[in-house]
Amino acid sequence: MKIEKFEDIIAWQKTRELVKEIYRITKNEEFSKDYSLKDQIQRASVSIMSNIAEGYERGTKEELIQFLYIARGSCGEVRSQLYIAYDLNYISLQEFQKLQKLAIEVSRLIYHFIEYLKGARIRGQKFRKPKVKSFREEIEELLKTYTTSETPETIETSETPETNQINENNDGTKQL
């Protein structure tokens, strides 16, 4: 599978599911009153998603790997906070297990992506050479520009054909 944008990264897609679930459970009446934990677990889950996206958009393999490590750390933070939420009876055992499983899956996906990138011979978007247009492509582009712009019939000019004629004087000088 070719990755053309960060939304194509499976770890990012799974993290999106995790973020939705985290926001859902933090709406629970008891959980929502614990502003500190609610805010922290929401920010940590969003951090996973954001770091995957930012690392990809940075354009180098090295930076992507660095941001993936940060995302993985945030994933561990979410898992730890889920234990707190469970211990304080903010979430049920079933919710805890479901979210832990999803968070572990995200962490594994990130880990495997990092390992793949370490061995890959890619350098990143920043190092891609821009596509050079052929002479034919450049001409076709120019023709499109001229055919979609004003045509000679629609261009108004103050000059008449008579004023554009060059007259030669008797002394050899030229005059418009």
Image: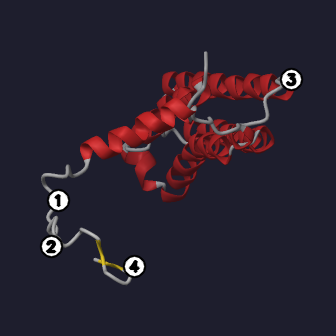
Q: Are marks 1 and 3 in contact (CB under 8 Å)?
A: no
Q: Which residue is mark 1?
A: 155
State the separation of the CA atoms marked 3 and 4.
Answer: 78 Å
Q: Secondary structure at mark 1?
A: loop
Mark sitting earlier along the chain (1/3): 3
State the separation of the CA atoms marked 4 and 1.
Answer: 34 Å
Q: Which residue is mark 4?
A: 172
Q: Which residue is mark 3?
A: 119
Mark sitting earlier along the chain (2/3): 3
Q: Residue 1, how many percent across, how many down?
A: 61, 15
**As shown in the figure, which amino acid type bears the numbered disc 4?**
Gly
Q: Secondary structure at mark 2?
A: loop
State the separation of the CA atoms marked 2 and 4.
Answer: 28 Å
Q: Residue 49, how many percent across, how many down?
A: 57, 40
Q: Nearer the viewer, residue 143 or 120?
A: 143
Examine the rendering and report whether any part of residue 72 can be seen: no
The answer to which image quadrant residue 73 occupies is top right
Instruction: Judge from the rendering whether residue 161 lies leftward or rightward of residue 94; answer left or right.
Output: left
| Mark 1 closeness class: few <14, some 14–19, many ≥20 residues within 10 Å | few
Image quarter in which the C terminus is found = bottom left
Examine the rendering and report whether any part of residue 110 can be seen: yes
Q: Which residue is mark 2?
A: 158
Q: Nearer the viewer, residue 48 or 124?
A: 124
Residue furthest out toward the top = 1
Q: Nearer the viewer, mark 2 or mark 1?
A: 2
Q: Residue at x 67, y 47 (%)?
A: 58
Above/below status of 123 relative to 66: above
Q: Nearer the viewer, mark 4 or mark 1?
A: 4
| Mark 4 closeness class: few <14, some 14–19, many ≥20 residues within 10 Å | few
Q: Are marks 2 and 3 in contact (CB under 8 Å)?
A: no
